[in-house]
Amino acid sequence: MQVNCAPACESCDLLDISHRCPIEPGNDAIWKPGDLNRLLEDVVDDASGTGEYKRFKPKALSRPSRKRDGTPVEGTEETKDGPWVVLLDAFVSEAEAGRCRASRSPLRFSLFL
């Protein structure tokens, strides 16, 4: 209850993320500066040349106007200069989506247990 109501009454130290999830000395950050940009350039532009993400049919709806090497992005007139927003058109196939819809059951619950 304290964690959920603490913002309303400002009553406990659990409001401070450093108390709930402290970063231990010596723990390095998993993501280094530029890593997310590098990943998204690989997803959208196949920057690594592996073609790993092509099957998802990625499209940048918004992206930085310059690549990490400083070169301008080709076709930026189609996308908005800004933060990364990527659409993966083929992330889930029609068959997978159909199985998800078929497997769901109606939400059932009772107020009286």
Image: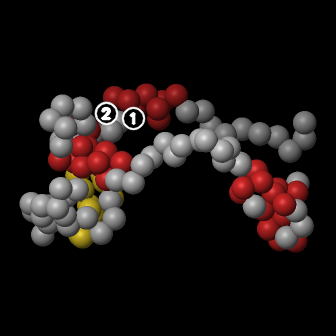
Disc 1: CA contacts within 10 A as few (<14), some (14-19) or many (>=20) = few
Measured in 3D between alpha carbons, the distance from the residue under mark 2 to the one under mark 1, in whole angstroms, is: 6 Å
Going by the numbered disc 1, the residue's amino acid type is: Ala
- Quarter of the figure with residue 15: bottom right
Disc 2: CA contacts within 10 A as few (<14), some (14-19) or many (>=20) = few
Residue wearing tag 2: 93
Residue 8 appears left or right of 48: right
Image position, residue 90 (x, y; %): 27, 39
Residue wearing tag 1: 97
Residue at point 12% right, 61% down? Answer: 71
For the residues labelled 2 and 1, say whether their Cβ atoms are less than 8 Å apart.
yes
Image position, residue 52 (x, y; %): 23, 32
Residue at point 18% right, 43% down? Answer: 47
Image position, residue 70 (x, y; %): 17, 61
Q: Is residue 24 above or below residue 75?
A: above
Residue at point 88% right, 62% down? Answer: 12
Going by the numbered disc 2, the residue's amino acid type is: Ser
Residue 23 appears left or right of 30: right
Q: Can I make out residue 58 in this image?
A: no
Looking at the rendering, in which quadrant would you find the C terminus?
top right
Q: Can I make out residue 77 in this image?
A: yes
Residue 72 appears left or right of 95: left
